[in-house]
Image: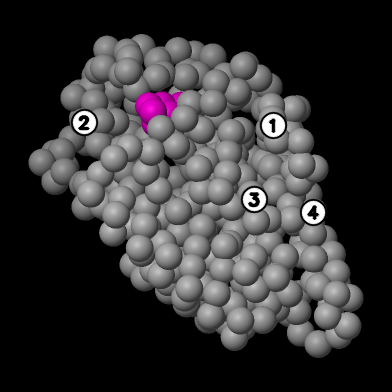
Amino acid sequence: MQRRIVLTGGGSAGHVTANLVLISRLLDEGWDIHYIGSKRGIERELVAGFKNVRYYPVSTGKLRRYWAWANVTDFFNLLLGIVQAFLLLFRIKPGVVFSLGGFVAVPVVVGTALNGVPVIIFEPDLHPGLANRISRKFAQVMCTTLSKSIALDRNVDGKMVHVGPIVREELKLGSRARGIGLCGFNDEKHILLIMGGSQGAERINRIVREALPELLKGYQVVHICGIGKIDLSFGRYAGYKQFEYAREEFPDLMAMADIVVSRAGSNAIHELLLLRKPMLLIPHAIGGTRTGQTLNAGYFKDVGYAEVLYEADLTKETLLKAVDVTYSNQKSYVDAMKSSKMEGAVDKVMALFEMAVNKQKEGTGD
């Protein structure tokens, strides 16, 4: 009998990318794969690349920690999403559901639990976000990227299992030469990659462009600035290349970069760790995943992988100084990263899927 799984997660690329890695492995092993996400989220676009994965949209509501009138409508959207997810899961009858988090996943996790189907969730950050703190109540297992997450955990429920980061191994196939050709750069000047996440980072974009004339004195700059956030007026600068969002070209852009300026989402920083790229991290400032990013960045700095520039301190002058410090100390970051262990996460998660499906079969007598 074919093993059947439902995956969920979305709202940003960071809540989807690990699922894409797992989908490739699941397809190789013959699983029947379904994906539940939002109607217009980035997850729908990214999952569309897999022909044998069926996608189902449900209503979602954003989770906020502050009062806003949108909370009222989003509460009802969330309830509607739970009902829709419950009915979908009743029809699909998966052996296990895996959630990568984000507000998109909450109605799916609740709907799964109401169907009596086992739920496994994955926490990419050092500290769980609100969506996963809610989802955890309905899950059998919470997988963690960082072992320190378990040591910091205050909920003694035995659900947390350290598996490590789920990263795209194909990033190792990037070519520096292809990246340089794509950007029209040369191999004689240092290359700086700047990225603010799949949705871009308005303040980082603004400060980078303010600092661009000075940056270009020492570096060629490739800037992934977010959908709709390219500024064509900066096309006049030689040695500066803008992308809205990088997909197929991303491995080559990473391969050519000498140092990287990035937000501190778990997916991004672990991909940089995989490739041993010296990184300057500018985490989101406050709230939710933003708090998670601050903790991620602090941890990477403490273990010697990165330099950190907090958004409250971000100016043209501090950016220029921090970039130069990161470049000057790049060897120490690379040496520290050589001791990291990045293998085995996918195997561990796949083993959890098998265990959940087998236990479900035993419980139903199939």
Say few, some or many: other residues with alpha carbon within 10 Å of mark 1 (under 14 / 14 to 19 / 20 or more).
few
First in sequence, mark 3 or 4: give its number. Answer: 3
Rendering coords of residue 314 (x, y %): 31, 19
Q: Is residue 132 above or below residue 336?
A: below
- Horizontal side of residue 220 vs 103, given as left or right: left
Q: Report whether residue 31 is seen.
A: no
Label 2 – label 3 distance at C-alpha: 40 Å
Amino acid at the residue labelled 4: Lys
**Mark seen at residue 348:** 4
Label 1 – label 4 distance at C-alpha: 21 Å
**Closer mark to the observer between disc 3 and disc 1:** 3
**Mark seen at residue 153:** 1
Label 3 – label 1 distance at C-alpha: 14 Å
Q: Provide the residue span drawn in magenta.
A: 281-286
Rendering coords of residue 87 (x, y %): 53, 80
Mark 4 element type: helix
First in sequence, mark 1 or 4: give its number. Answer: 1
First in sequence, mark 3 or 1: give its number. Answer: 3
